[in-house]
């Protein structure tokens, strides 16, 4: 079925008009369709893979409800549910266009969003938000670090892949040990806070919570943005000026956070390759190459 037809069927099942439907760009895992009519203007999202047995929208639905309570500007949740075998999420359409990568005020808003997210309570979050190490965020973080520290062994497949050299093992162990000694507040992390996920109209609005997870709240989102800057990512262009504005919006200084961000980047570089070995061998070469670059920058 054409995605527009299915999106209209979902809207009609909710009693919403379906005068016009258009497929929006940017949906890698999900179809994203704007459906508008006399009384509503909505975005319907549903998985491209109709055979999926899991529910990909529990996290997003919960996130949007919590954001509405805390006053963080995001899409308003209209509905989430199933139509036959199709899981869907429906939100209000946010007018405007994605912010430009050179819009420094958008980057300042991102910093403010990141700071606000650290106040959200995850105790009612769905199981899908949490890692395999459980719902106790502090214990889960410690186990995550312990796993990556113990994996820095004499026989480590990452050495064979060229991600790091044997001579790097001791400094990597020091970085991860330092990270483990820190007391980092744990909570929700957006995971993809670039200007492409911020709509600029009358103010700035965050969209797309499909990458939300738990971890060191505030710092993990900052690490992702800084990682784009370090790598010169062409899709999420982060200039040094933009980075400075993000930190200012979050109420932080570079000297306060960059040592721990180096540690978080090292952790990510190691962990993502181990994940690819276990879950996504099709992405192994790509992620190993990126991690090699990152480790050369932080070691």
Image: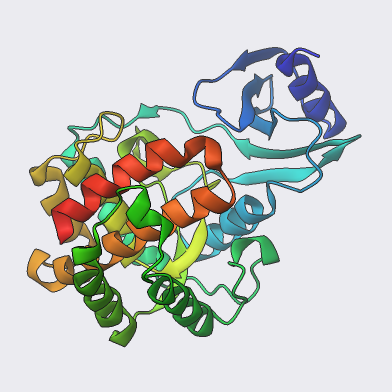
Quadrant containing the C terminus is: bottom left
Left or right of 157 in this view: 108: left
Left or right of 248 in this view: 219: right
Relative to 297, say whether 10 is above or below: above
Instruction: Say which residue appears at 73% left-offset and 44% top-offset.
Output: 79
Q: Position of residue 277 (x, y in %)?
A: 52, 50
Q: Nearer the viewer, residue 182 or 32?
A: 182
Q: Position of residue 57 (x, y in %)?
A: 68, 47
Quarter residue 85 falls in: top right
Quarter residue 102 falls in: top left
Q: How is the image coloured?
A: rainbow
Instruction: Say which residue appears at 38% left-offset and 79% top-offset.
Output: 185
Instruction: Say which residue appears at 31% left-offset and 37% top-offset.
Output: 195
Quadrant containing the N terminus is: top right
Residue 180 visible here: yes
Left or right of 26 in this view: 7: right
Q: Position of residue 142 (x, y in %)?
A: 45, 82
Quarter residue 39 falls in: top right
Relative to 124, say whether 237 is above or below: above
């Amino acid at each position: 079925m054409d995605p527009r037809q299915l999106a209209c069927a979902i809207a009609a099942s909710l009693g919403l008009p379906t005068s016009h439907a258009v497929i929006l760009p940017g949906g890698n895992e999900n179809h994203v369709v704007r459906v508008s009519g006399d009384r509503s203007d909505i975005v319907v999202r549903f998985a491209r893979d109709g055979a999926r047995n899991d529910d990909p929208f529990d996290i997003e639905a919960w996130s949007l409800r919590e954001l509405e309570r805390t006053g963080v500007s995001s899409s308003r949740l209209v509905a989430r549910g199933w139509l036959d075998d199709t899981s869907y999420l429906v939100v209000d359409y946010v007018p405007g266009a994605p912010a430009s990568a050179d819009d420094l005020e958008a980057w300042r808003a991102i910093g403010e969003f990141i700071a606000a997210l650290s106040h959200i309570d995850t105790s009612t979050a769905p199981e899908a938000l949490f890692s395999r190490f459980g719902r106790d965020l502090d214990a889960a973080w410690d186990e995550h670090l312990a796993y990556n520290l113990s994996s820095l062994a004499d026989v480590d497949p990452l050495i064979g892949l060229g991600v790091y050299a044997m001579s790097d093992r001791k400094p990597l162990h020091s970085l991860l040990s330092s990270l483990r000694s820190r007391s980092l507040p744990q909570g929700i992390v957006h995971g993809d806070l670039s200007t492409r996920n911020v709509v600029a109209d009358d103010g700035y609005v965050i969209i797309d919570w499909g990458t939300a997870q738990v971890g060191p709240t505030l710092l993990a989102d900052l690490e992702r943005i800084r990682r784009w800057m370090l790598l010169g990512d062409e899709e999420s262009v982060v200039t040094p000026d933009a980075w400075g504005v993000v930190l200012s919006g979050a109420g932080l200084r570079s000297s306060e956070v960059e040592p721990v961000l180096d540690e978080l980047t090292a952790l990510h570089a190691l962990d993502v390759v181990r994940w690819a070995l276990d879950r996504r061998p099709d992405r192994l070469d790509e992620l190993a190459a990126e991690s090699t670059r990152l480790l050369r920058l932080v070691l």
